[in-house]
Amino acid sequence: MLPALEERFSHALHNTARAWRLAVDRRLKHLGLSQASWLTVAMVAKAAEPLSQSELALRLGVEGATMVAMVDRLVKSGLVVREPSATDRRVKHVVLTDAGNVLYASVKAEALAFRTHLLADIDADRLLAVTELLEQLQAVAESAV
């Protein structure tokens, strides 16, 4: 592959992901949450099992201290609680409250509406091919660490 094309792809990937997050952020502005807040709430909501603060930080790609401060703000807002782990008393799991679940439902609905609008005119076969490419790139990037 030509280096110029690789650079163009990298640039397009980065900027599209950033533009996507910013557009969703604008749609969620009425909820009064920062991008970091709604991403954290969404990550907690989508987790198959309760996440510790360190697991949450790892999944969101932030430092532990940053995650502690974020969880502190979300606890203060009544959106999450810290619950002790049943297996390790040093670990606290981050769990959504009822208010956090209501907020996540709003976040999810707004994100779905945006995604539906954005992808409405994209051919399904082309979308599948690009999705598979991105999933492959993610797997390679994660294994290269």
Image (cartoon, rainbow, N blue to C red):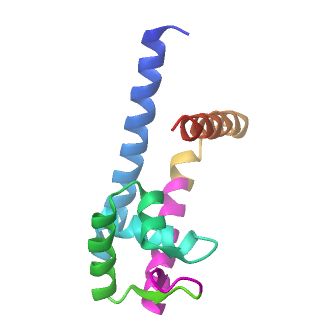
Which residue is located at x 43 percent, y 43 percent?
17
Expressed as whole percent of the image width and height from the top left, the position of residue 127 reads: 65, 38
Q: Is residue 54 above or below residue 84?
A: above
The count of marks equals 0
Most extreme residue toward the top is 2
Q: Is residue 108 above or below residue 139?
A: below
Which residue is located at x 35 percent, y 57 percent?
62
Q: Say whether residue 102 is left or right of residue 35.
A: right
Expressed as whole percent of the image width and height from the top left, the position of residue 44 reads: 50, 73
Magenta part of the protein: which range? 87-115
Which residue is located at x 34 percent, y 64 percent?
64
Instruction: Label the magenta part by its dominant secondary structure.
Output: helix
Q: Is residue 45 above or below residue 113?
A: below
Q: Nearer the viewer, residue 126 or 64?
A: 64
96 inside magenta stretch: yes
Expressed as whole percent of the image width and height from the top left, the position of residue 51 reads: 52, 73
Which residue is located at x 56 percent, y 10 percent?
1
Q: Nearer the viewer, residue 140 or 9?
A: 140
4 inside magenta stretch: no
Expressed as whole percent of the image width and height from the top left, the position of residue 84 reads: 48, 88
